[in-house]
Image: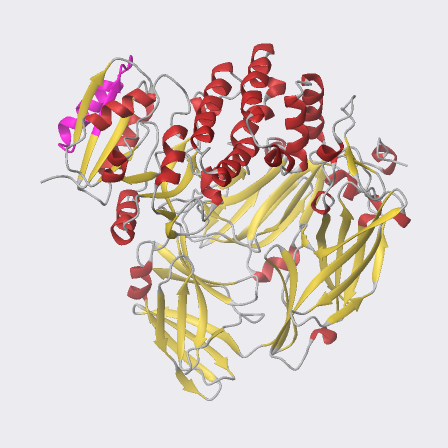
Amino acid sequence: MTPRLSVVVPVHNVEEHLGACLESLARQSLKDLDVVLVDDGSTDSSADVAREFAARDDRFRVVGRENGGLGAARNTGVAHTAPGTAYLAFVDSDDVLPSRAFELLTGALDKSGSDFASGNVLRLTGGGRLEQHPLFTKPMRSTRPATHVTKDWSLLLDRIACNKVFRRTFWDEHAFAFPEGVLYEDIPVVLPAHFAARAVDVLQDAVYYWRFRDSSITSRRAVVRGVADRTAAVLGVSRGLAGTPEHKRRYDESVLCEDLWYFMQVLPEGDAAYREAFLEHAGEFAAQVDPEVLAALPLHHRVKWQLARERRLDELLGLLEFERRSPRTHRVRGLRRRTAEYPPLTAPLPRDVLALAPGDLPLEARLTGAEWRDGRLRLTGYGYIRNLPAQARRHALKAAWLRTPDRRALPLRLKMINDPSVTSRSGQELHGYDWAGFEVAVDPARLLTESATTTWKLVLGVLGHSGVVGVARRGGVADGGAQLAVHYLDEHTRIVPVFADGRLRMNAERVQTWLTGHDSHDGVLTLTGGTRTRATALRLGHWHSEAAIQVPLVRDGERFTAEVPLDELVAVRGRGPVRAPHGESRPADAYSVQLVKPDGRRLPVAAPPGLPLGRHAAPGGRELAFTVSAWGNAVLTDQLPHAYTESVSWTDNSLVVQGLYGGGPGIPLQLRRTGAEEEVELPARCADDRFRVESAYEALTLIGEGEWRLSMGEAPVRVPAAAHPGLPAARTIAGRDFRVRRDGHDQLTLTVSKAEATPSEKAGPCAS
């Protein structure tokens, strides 16, 4: 019987990782595979590992050849695939696939008839952790069957072969073959395939775990061969699109902002030969680009590419170094026709290259604090126009107001604050923003209307100055570390401040449904609560998929009871897209708790103050936990045992964290640094479903500056609503600030930074 899918796996000196790759292929839920392992002249034991695996599984075959590189090995593998297979895929031998990868990709093609399917990619770090690969965040943001690169230009970033399954007839029709003896061999195949395809399926699910290795060809950039081969690859694609000018313009823009931009960024690390190679090869590409494409580039790209085209290497290097210290930073010159001025530049550039668009002077507004005091919500933060200094009060005039979707406006009295920390946190050295701080107070009574729910957006207006001409900007206020919390005015009225779509919103709500209790026994989860509606059912909506569990309500006036069989929760576990950071081993399945009215409308169930944190035993060694969302509503989570913080405090120079944990004894508190392969473990005392961690001073000295996520047993440490008032908890130790706070509403995070300087120490190049 002919296999459905042929998989080509080039193998060359990957003995350390090859076994994991082959095991992931053998575990695929799509069993009907033809796997061709191409030994590309390995000098280690890789070939032996491949042959031993093929001897155990007759779906695997080994083909040997002299070393010719990845492209040649792939082409050899294609030539040796079983005839008549419907689909074709490629896997690199140091990477890993989730178990349903090929099932999902071929299943999409079976339904759509598209020419190939492409899925999301997670990066597999050296420590075995999974992260969303940034290159695929935008193109794989959602599942989209039968789309095309000309409908969604972000697919130009989807330029590797290994996250795809190709329809074999499509592959053969276009006689695709990988270039041999070069790096970046995917681009000359994948990009033309995107344009040649009649339709493409895009999957949000992760279908590929791309191992990040310092020695891999994709992690080395400042080498002559790399920039030469990458330029040759993209230049070939660009010239192939010459017959479709709009497609070529779009692609050329992507190359300048992505492909070759990666090589420009490492010019300071490169030697003289690399720098000359960049100017030669990247300059060749830029020379054939339509001038309108160069003119339409964002300012920070446009200026650097102009310097590269003029071969002004010293100034380009100076600008790259300057922007590492002060990204997207420049002075503003001119009154009406404003232009950018960069300190490292010693000679003029064309005025149109330096011309500023409105988007080059954006509003930067963040909320740093939120506190209920004297019956009002006190909001503190900052707002300035990037690259227009706010070092003097008169250069930082501000106004604030609340606005509803129907454009009702509520002016707020704003107090301007001199806050030097705004300059230090701006991440640049050229401008001072000390007078960007503000404070406003919100009277909750003014937010209530005749509607059950009224949404207000905080809007900040800023008038900055460029010379003698004012520049006005207004917009929403983003999260700057403020610790938001739901506030009840009475039993059934609340104010809900949240960050939605990246900006602060405040909902004034009259609560219509609420949860009062929960219990679990005899395989049934029982929920009790109250409602002022005619709701007839309770619905648990699975956050990670379209699955839902709905059960009838038993009503007694305003009170209700609902019973959910635990077996139904177990049946939903694990559904939905495979995503970072857990991949297939998702530690928690969360559900929204809603009531359903006779007309089908759904109402969120509020979690009022005092609702006990629920933790009930669930099948499979998991637990059911009731927590509170950022919106103040009940959330049910079917999860591995999680730690829940009850208190965080400092005793002398020791950090003390204690709370609830049902994961057993001997589990340490783990601190993992965001964006780095660093981990610190602190011993925890666990007994009677409780834990206590008391760090010694010596342990704190091991924690470097940065943001650290706290976890126990591979699950994040959560902060229930009852513990929110005790955070943040801060202490300065040995010249460093340690701050424990909530992040993402209910995850415990430790931030370590240099202690705030004294006023005299803060004086610097931005001081007046």
The residue lying toward the viewer, choosing from 432 and 246, is: 246
Q: Is residue 132 visible?
A: no
> Which quadrant holds residue 331?
top right
Q: Residue furthest front?
A: 243
The residue lying toward the viewer, choosing from 185 and 756, is 185
In the displayed image of the protein, which residue is found farthest to the top? 273
* x, y percent for residue 760: 88, 34
Front one among 242 and 232: 242
Which contiguous range is marked in magenta? 36-59
Q: Is residue 133 magenta?
A: no
- Image quarter (top left, top right, bottom left or bottom right) of the C terminus: top right
Picture quarter with the N terminus:
top left
Asked whether the viewer can see residue 758, the reply is yes
- Quadrant housing residue 622: bottom left
Residue 606 left/right relative to 438: left
Q: Residue at x 52, y 33 (%)?
A: 252
Does residue 3 appear to the left or right of 538 in the view shown?
Answer: left
Q: Position of residue 255 (x, y in %)?
A: 52, 32
Q: Is residue 341 above or below residue 413?
A: above
Q: Residue at x 67, y 70 (%)?
A: 404
Residue 240 in percent (x, y) is at: 42, 30
**Relative to residue 115, is residue 230 depicted above or below?**
above
Please report the residue visible at 24 percent of the width from the left and 50 percent of the height from the top.
110
Label count reads 0
Residue ID at (24%, 22%): 76
Q: Is residue 45 magenta?
A: yes
